[in-house]
Image (cartoon, rainbow, N blue to C red):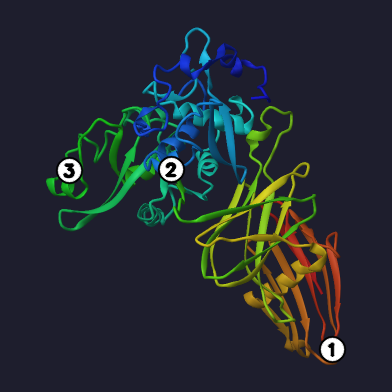
């Protein structure tokens, strides 16, 4: 924990910490991940750290215990070195984090002061938390965060966050449940107040695990959409419709849903109430047989990277661009912000006029920018760039798919003007075109359009034999945008002779919005 922590009132609790070896804490220190190991979300106990987000993610993984077990390098503490090892997907790369068997304890008594298990001999929670803290520099660094970020660190899998107002929410939930994805929901920040949440048995700013989703027929005609939800720790439960004490349950529905009235923190709720009391839903897309591959990249401001990947089979793949977590910078004076990141995928073709066929692109300003696509066999090139907010940093590009995908870094000088060539293909594909028949040049064409990754193209193509196409453009409003070289400023002038073509590219540099008003001649 070399980085330490800032000196402020928030960190007074760290001053009371003393480090104790496992033998001083547990009466049976040999019990760790052996056959008696019990992975149960109900045994997780949060300590003095404000890391509910992390423990909620861990508790959700506990629903399938092997997801926790495979994080540990060994099922026991190393008897010689007394070392524990955990695998974490730190900033987009799987790394082995090793720690000794000492744990932070309250200096007044030899008990762990941070997260642990209600069974004193099961120390896996404490060591997983310690490895997570070491990965980011200290326990202080893992206070507060998002469950989406914790899911990525623990699984390496893409995590989707959706709002409760999404019109396709039930369809998304049922498909995610069928695919055995991890589903959580955050209570709070809705129209329901904190006091009202308490009155109905829910806890504000608390992540719950969605265990099951079913639709059931009521009175032989009405359909009810029901979710089974678990409070990861604590026995506080929902007390409204379809709760354990609701009179809506019939013997037939109890049998269909395998309903049991237990005070165990799990409960049923209908979709209407779920959307009212839970604000955001997180879906971690864990595929047991998918392969994860990553490539660490460096890019100066204003630069870009090119990657090549070759596919032998039709493949479903999640492509992700991962920036360094804000947790890496919490104890510095730097106000670290995520930068606009984008990637553009093109397929290599044998057509000399269109050597790179535009496939799709993605843009975002989050730690992980990801998207899913089904790709056919072939060779592909990825154009990747980050518009750094501050100094240049490294980042990681990853693939997660049912096929082993190997990426190769390409030399940019071997692919001159590749972004222009990609967008010429995009222009033809989108086919947003006007011709100049009324001007006596029916074989002159102007393509223009906006892409999902924030690029606008203006592509002029002259197939006339004796006409020249002139295009002068001045932008009277040009906010949140920039012209790509060789053009600059807020205007450009093109002269496209017979048999020629030219393209102008405009890049969005502000995701909050942009204004574009032009005068064209």
Mark 2 falls on what kind of element?
helix
Q: Nearer the viewer, mark 1 or mark 2?
A: 2
Q: Residue 275 bears which disc, if any?
A: none
Residue 474 vs residue 102, the one in the foreground? 102
Please give the name of the residue rendered at 53% of the width and 62% of the height, measured from the top-left corner: 403
State the separation of the CA atoms marked 1 and 3. Answer: 78 Å
Which badge, 3 or 2, comes first in the chain's sequence?
A: 2
The residue wearing badge 2 is 67
Residue 322: tell me if it is visible.
yes
Q: Position of residue 469 (x, y in %)?
A: 83, 82
Q: Position of residue 345 (x, y in %)?
A: 65, 65
Q: Nearer the viewer, mark 1 or mark 3?
A: 3
Report whether 317 appears left or right of 58: right
Numbered disc total: 3
Quadrant housing residue 434: bottom right
Report whether 500 appears left or right of 58: right
The residue wearing badge 3 is 249
The residue wearing badge 1 is 467
């Amino acid at each position: 924990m070399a980085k330490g922590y800032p000196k402020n009132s928030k960190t007074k609790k760290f001053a009371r910490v003393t480090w104790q070896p496992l033998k001083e804490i547990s009466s049976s220190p040999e019990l760790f991940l052996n056959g008696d190991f019990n992975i149960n979300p109900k045994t997780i106990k949060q300590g003095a750290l404000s890391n509910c987000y992390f423990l909620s993610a861990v508790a959700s993984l506990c629903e399938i215990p092997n997801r926790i077990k495979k994080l540990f390098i060994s099922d026991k503490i190393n008897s010689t070195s007394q070392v524990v090892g955990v695998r974490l997907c730190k900033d987009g790369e799987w790394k082995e984090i090793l720690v000794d068997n000492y744990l932070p304890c309250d200096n007044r008594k030899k008990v762990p002061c941070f997260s642990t298990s209600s069974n004193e001999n099961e120390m896996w929670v404490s060591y997983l938390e310690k490895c997570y803290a070491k990965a980011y520099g200290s326990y202080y660094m893992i206070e507060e965060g998002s469950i989406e970020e914790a899911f990525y660190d623990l699984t390496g899998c893409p995590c989707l966050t959706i709002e409760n107002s999404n019109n396709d929410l039930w369809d998304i939930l049922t498909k995610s449940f069928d695919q055995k994805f991890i589903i959580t929901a955050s209570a709070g920040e809705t129209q329901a107040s904190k006091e009202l949440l308490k009155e109905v048995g829910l806890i504000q700013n608390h992540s719950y695990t969605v265990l099951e989703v079913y639709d059931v027929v009521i009175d032989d005609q009405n359909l009810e959409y029901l979710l089974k939800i678990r409070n990861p720790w604590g026995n506080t439960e929902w007390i409204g419709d379809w709760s354990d004490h609701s009179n809506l349950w019939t013997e037939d529905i109890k049998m269909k849903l395998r309903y049991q009235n237990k005070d165990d923190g799990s409960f049923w709720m209908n979709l209407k109430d779920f959307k009212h009391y839970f604000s955001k839903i997180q879906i971690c897309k864990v595929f047991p047989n998918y392969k994860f591959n990553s490539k660490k990249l460096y890019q100066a401001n204003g630069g870009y990277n090119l990657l090549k990947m070759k596919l032998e089979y039709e493949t479903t793949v999640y492509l992700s661009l991962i920036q360094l977590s804000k947790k890496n910078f919490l104890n510095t004076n730097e106000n670290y912000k995520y930068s606009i990141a984008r990637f553009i995928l093109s397929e290599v073709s044998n057509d000399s006029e269109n050597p790179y066929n535009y496939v799709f692109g993605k843009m975002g300003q989050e730690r992980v920018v990801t998207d899913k696509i089904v790709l056919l066999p072939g060779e592909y090139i990825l154009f990747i760039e980050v518009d750094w907010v501050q100094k240049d940093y490294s980042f990681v590009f990853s693939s997660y798919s049912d096929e082993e995908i190997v990426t190769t870094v390409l030399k940019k000088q071997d692919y001159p003007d590749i972004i222009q060539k990609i967008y010429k293909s995009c222009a033809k594909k989108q086919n947003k075109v006007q011709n100049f028949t009324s001007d006596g040049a029916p074989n002159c064409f102007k393509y223009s359009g906006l892409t999902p990754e924030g690029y606008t193209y203006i592509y002029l193509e002259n197939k006339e034999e004796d006409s020249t196409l002139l295009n002068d453009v001045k932008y009277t409003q040009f906010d949140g945008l920039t012209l790509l070289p060789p053009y600059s400023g807020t205007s450009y002038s093109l002269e496209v002779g017979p048999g020629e073509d030219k393209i102008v590219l405009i890049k969005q540099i502000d995701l909050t919005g942009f204004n574009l008003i032009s005068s064209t001649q």
